[in-house]
């Protein structure tokens, strides 16, 4: 048993281009709202989400399955949308699969991939981060 642990300590570190292991999974039939933060690779399948969803680490991979419905803001390093979304996505890399239905704003630096069949009504900014709205007395 000690020898197995010793061998794992000497494994090569994960390369930057390797996919991180799945760290979070939200299965079908969940209704979530609020501010959600995730680390690593997160898969959301068949759930309804309202609010802000943020990947907090360097991997920051968020995948929304074909049955997922999102109403809010999503931020990560790589975001793949296969379901329905209304809101905004901010990520260096964004992918809309053939089953995606998106309405909102996309802020990206490195690229946007849209597969044939995806339906979008979007404003796209390819220069990076969005400007955060400052709180005003009327908005509080």
Image (spheres, rainbow, N blue to C red):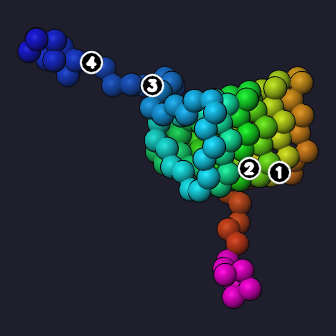
* Quadrant assignment for the N terminus: top left
Q: Which residue is mark 2?
A: 71
Q: Residue at x 71, y 53 (%)?
A: 72
Q: Which residue is mark 3?
A: 21
> Helix or strand or loop: what does disc 1 sit on?
strand
Q: Nearer the viewer, mark 3 or mark 4?
A: 3
Q: Residue at x 14, y 17 (%)?
A: 6
User: Callout 1 environment at 10 Å: few (<14), some (14 to 19), or many (20+)?
Assistant: some
x and y, in percent, of residue 126 in the image = 77, 48
**Which mark is first along the chain, 1 or 3?**
3
Report the span colored magenta: 134-140
Q: Which residue is mark 1?
A: 104
x and y, in percent, of residue 117 in the image = 89, 24
**Which mark is first along the chain, 1 or 4?**
4
> Helix or strand or loop: what does disc 2 sit on?
strand
How many tags in the picture?
A: 4
> Helix or strand or loop: what does disc 4 sit on?
loop
Q: Nearer the viewer, mark 4 or mark 1?
A: 1
Against 22, residue 57 (above or below) is below
Pick whichever, 95 or 64, lies toward us: 64
Q: Which residue is mark 4?
A: 11
**Which mark is first along the chain, 3 or 2?**
3
For the question of whether residue 91 can be seen, the reply is no
x and y, in percent, of residue 91 in the image = 65, 45
**Left or right, residue 93 beside residue 106:** left
């Amino acid at each position: 048993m000690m020898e197995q642990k010793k061998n794992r300590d000497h494994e090569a570190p994960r390369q930057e281009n390797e996919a991180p292991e799945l760290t979070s999974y939200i299965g079908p039939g969940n209704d979530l709202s609020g501010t959600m933060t995730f680390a690593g690779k997160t898969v959301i399948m068949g759930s309804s989400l309202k609010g802000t969803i943020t990947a907090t680490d360097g991997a920051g991979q968020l995948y929304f399955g074909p049955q997922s419905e999102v109403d809010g803001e999503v931020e990560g390093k790589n975001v793949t949308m296969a379901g329905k979304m209304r809101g905004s996505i901010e990520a260096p890399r964004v992918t809309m699969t053939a089953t995606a239905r998106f309405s909102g704003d996309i802020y990206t630096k490195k690229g946007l991939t849209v597969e044939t069949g995806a339906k979008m009504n979007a404003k796209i900014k390819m220069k990076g981060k969005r400007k955060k709205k400052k709180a005003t007395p009327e908005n509080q």
